[in-house]
Image (cartoon, rainbow, N blue to C red):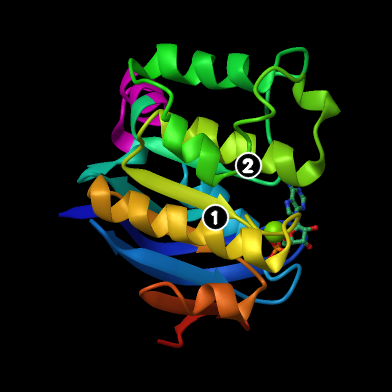
């Protein structure tokens, strides 16, 4: 099944970032987008994940075009089906790790996966306030929180920035297993080519175009 289909996307801020970009994501598929800093990777991910309206072009999720969805349908999809792992973590700052995870579990009617917390090495941080954690630990709590709600599409922006190589690889392994187990898909933005090439397809945002490398 086609999870996401983007057609003819163009966007500019002070200058044109990209034009006529198209992209499809299937179930159980992982796509990486690389490109130099400032090339528009995060902007593209914001458009694909419904956070930003493209100047031109359209994005469909699960066969429905975003621009034609009612507000209610769009917020339902955002809440239930989309998982955003972005650099700004949006954790609830006054709360502990566990409280952050429980909020996600309650909202989505799922349970917190203890095994996942162990693999992310945050099982010992559960009683700590998230503001007491390192950047890398906060990042892993936010990854656990996103996966707890069991989304159909993961949108991931520079997930391994705060992580050492071994932890970064483990996080990637968790993402790959997740999308296979849940028939989900992932679009990942990174400047790390090693990480990118572990995905099924790799695209590069260069000269305003999205070029498929593999
Ligand atoms: N909300 C915004 N308003 C104005 N300019 C923006 C905005 N978001 C991004 N930009 C500009 O667009 C360009 C691409 O940014 P971004 O998509 O974050 O690139 P990347 O993620 O590839 O580093 C940058 O020059 C950035 O300053
Ligand atoms: Mg970026």
In magenta stretch: residue 195: no
Instruction: Tell me the residue at 37%/64% (across/down).
Output: 30
Q: Quadrant of residue 41?
A: bottom right
Q: Quadrant of residue 107?
A: top left
Q: Do callouts 1 and 2 mark residues in contact (Cβ within 8 Å)?
A: yes
Which type of secondary structure does the marked residue at label 2 adopt?
helix
Q: Is mark 2 within 8 Å of ligand 2?
A: no
Q: Residues within 10 Å of mark 2 (few under 14, many from 20)?
A: many
Left or right, residue 138 beside residue 108: right
CA separation, marks 1 and 2? 8 Å
Q: State the residue in front, 30 or 145.
A: 145
Residue 105 in the image, given as x and y percentages of width and height: 43, 18
Q: Main secondary structure of the magenta part?
A: helix
- Residue 57 visible, this angle: no
Left or right, residue 75 beside residue 24: right
Instruction: Tell me the residue at 52%/14% (across/down).
Output: 103
Q: Which residue is at the far bottom?
A: 213
**Residue 171 - label:** 1
Q: Which residue is at the far left?
A: 1
Check the picture and name the quadrant holding the C terminus. Answer: bottom left
**Residue 140 - label:** 2
Q: How many marks?
A: 2
Residue 66 in the image, given as x and y percentages of width and height: 35, 39
In magenta stretch: residue 75: yes
Q: State the residue in front, 55 or 64.
A: 64
- Residue 171 visible, this angle: yes
Which residues are drawn in magenta?
68-79
Instruction: Tell me the residue at 30%/48% (across/down).
Output: 60
Which type of secondary structure does the marked residue at label 1 adopt?
helix
């Amino acid at each position: 099944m086609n999870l996401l289909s983007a057609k003819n996307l163009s966007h500019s801020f002070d200058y044109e970032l990209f034009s006529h970009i198209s992209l499809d994501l299937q179930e159980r598929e992982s796509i990486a987008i690389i490109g130099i800093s400032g090339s528009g990777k995060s902007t593209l991910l914001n458009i694909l994940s419904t956070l930003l309206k493209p100047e031109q072009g359209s994005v469909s999720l699960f066969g429905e075009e975003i621009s034609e969805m009612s507000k209610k349908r769009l917020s339902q999809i955002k809440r239930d089906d989309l998982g955003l792992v972005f650099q700004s973590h949006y954790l609830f700052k006054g709360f502990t790790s566990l409280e952050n995870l429980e909020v996600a579990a309650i909202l989505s009617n799922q349970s917190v996966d203890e095994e996942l917390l162990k693999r992310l090495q945050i099982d010992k941080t559960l009683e700590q306030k998230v503001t007491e954690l390192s950047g890398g630990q906060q990042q892993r709590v936010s990854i656990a929180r996103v996966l707890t709600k069991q989304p159909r599409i993961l949108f991931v922006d520079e997930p391994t920035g705060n992580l050492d190589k071994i932890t970064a690889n483990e996080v990637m392994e968790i993402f790959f297993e997740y999308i296979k187990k849940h028939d989900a898909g992932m679009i990942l933005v990174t400047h790390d080519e090693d990480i990118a090439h572990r995905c099924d397809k790799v695209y590069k945002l260069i000269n305003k175009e999205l070029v498929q490398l593999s």
